[in-house]
Image (tube, helix red, strand yellow):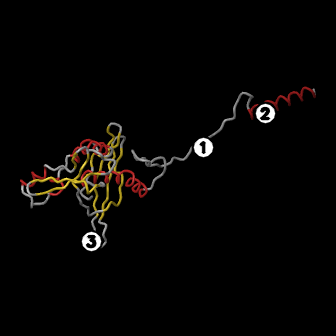
């Protein structure tokens, strides 16, 4: 009787151990706590991703990574803002007016084709062609009533860039804006289009305060993010 009781107790212990630890073929179950969700702002075409970004930080990174390079390219296309060899020039006459083309020495822009290719890195095809077709009339006679139609027609014959003897020349322009870029925010974003608001303010304390907003758009076209709306009134 005692032996039978001992055998029953041993069997009960073995069953209890099996219930607690499982059989040799079972694996212990691990319960994983869910990882807290991380709020991120992802800006297409930039390095702004995979980390939380404050509005001020986002604005600064958008300015440095997206807008300043595009504004610089716009300045090159519209104002001839590149380096020059002022010893290598030629004159072009339209009526009684003399205009001077100066050779571009910036190694990025050895030809109009190179200039066009560089513009396409930032702007849509439509904007690129609009910029490349600018003439002197577009730059200096807008809103200037001192030019009659004959003079305007003469200015239309002068492109801002031209080629001569395999070299690129530009009409050197100088025009500055009255506002300074203050901040940028994203208004809306989809997989193929982003709308921004750019805030520009007057940079001088002794002048009346000017605080204006402009809307910009970038779109994914043929696998590349480019500006399709790029106002430059403040530049």
**Disc 3 vs disc 2: Cβ atoms closer than 8 Å?**
no
Q: How far across and how far down the image is residue 223, in percent? A: 35, 37
Q: Residues within 10 Å of mark 2 (few under 14, many from 20)?
A: few
Question: With respect to residue 176, does 170 lie above or below?
Answer: above
Front-most of 96 and 128?
Answer: 96
Front-most of 141 and 67?
Answer: 141
| Disc 2, SS | helix
Front-most of 80 and 19?
Answer: 80
Q: Nearer the viewer, mark 2 or mark 1?
A: 1
Q: How far across and how far down the image is residue 91, in percent? A: 17, 54
Point 22% across, 49% down: residue: 161
Point 32% across, 48% down: residue: 195
* The image quarter in which residue 117 lies: top left
Q: How far across and how far down the image is residue 232, in percent? A: 25, 55
Left or right position of 154 against 172:
left
**Residue of label 3:** 207
> What's the CA distance linking mark 3 and mark 2?
86 Å
Q: Residues within 10 Å of mark 3 (few under 14, many from 20)?
A: few
| Disc 3, SS | loop
Left or right position of 134 against 73:
left
Point 36% across, 50% down: residue: 66
**Residue of label 1:** 33
Q: Quadrant of the C terminus?
A: bottom left
Task: Give whichever of discs 2 and 1 has the lower sequence position.
Answer: 2
The tally of labels here is: 3
* The image quarter in which residue 22 lies: top right
Task: Give whichever of discs 3 and 2 has the lower sequence position.
Answer: 2
> What's the CA distance linking mark 2 and mark 1?
28 Å
**Disc 3 vs disc 1: Cβ atoms closer than 8 Å?**
no
**Residue of label 2:** 17
Front-most of 139 and 1?
Answer: 139
- Residue 11, label in figure: none
């Amino acid at each position: 009787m005692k032996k039978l009781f001992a055998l029953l107790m041993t069997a009960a212990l073995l069953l209890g151990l099996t219930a607690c630890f499982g059989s040799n073929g079972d694996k212990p179950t691990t319960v994983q706590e869910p990882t807290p969700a991380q709020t991120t702002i992802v800006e297409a075409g930039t390095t702004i991703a995979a980390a939380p970004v404050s509005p001020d930080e986002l604005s600064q990174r958008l300015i440095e990574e997206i807008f300043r390079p595009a504004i610089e390219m716009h300045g090159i296309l519209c104002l001839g803002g590149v380096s020059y060899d002022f010893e290598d020039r030629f004159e072009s006459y339209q009526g009684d007016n003399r205009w001077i083309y100066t050779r571009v020495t910036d190694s990025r822009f050895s030809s109009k084709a190179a200039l066009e290719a560089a513009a396409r890195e930032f702007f849509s095809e439509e904007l690129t062609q609009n910029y490349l077709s600018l003439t002197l009339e577009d730059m200096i006679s807008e809103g200037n009533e001192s030019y009659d139609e004959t003079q305007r027609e003469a200015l239309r014959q002068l492109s801002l860039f031209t080629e001569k003897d395999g070299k690129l020349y530009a009409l050197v322009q100088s025009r500055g804006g009255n506002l300074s870029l203050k901040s940028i925010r994203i208004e809306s974003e989809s997989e193929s289009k982003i709308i921004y608001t750019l805030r520009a303010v007057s940079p001088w304390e002794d002048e009346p305060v000017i605080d204006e907003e402009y809307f910009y758009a970038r779109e994914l076209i043929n696998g590349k993010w480019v500006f399709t709306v790029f106002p430059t009134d403040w530049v």
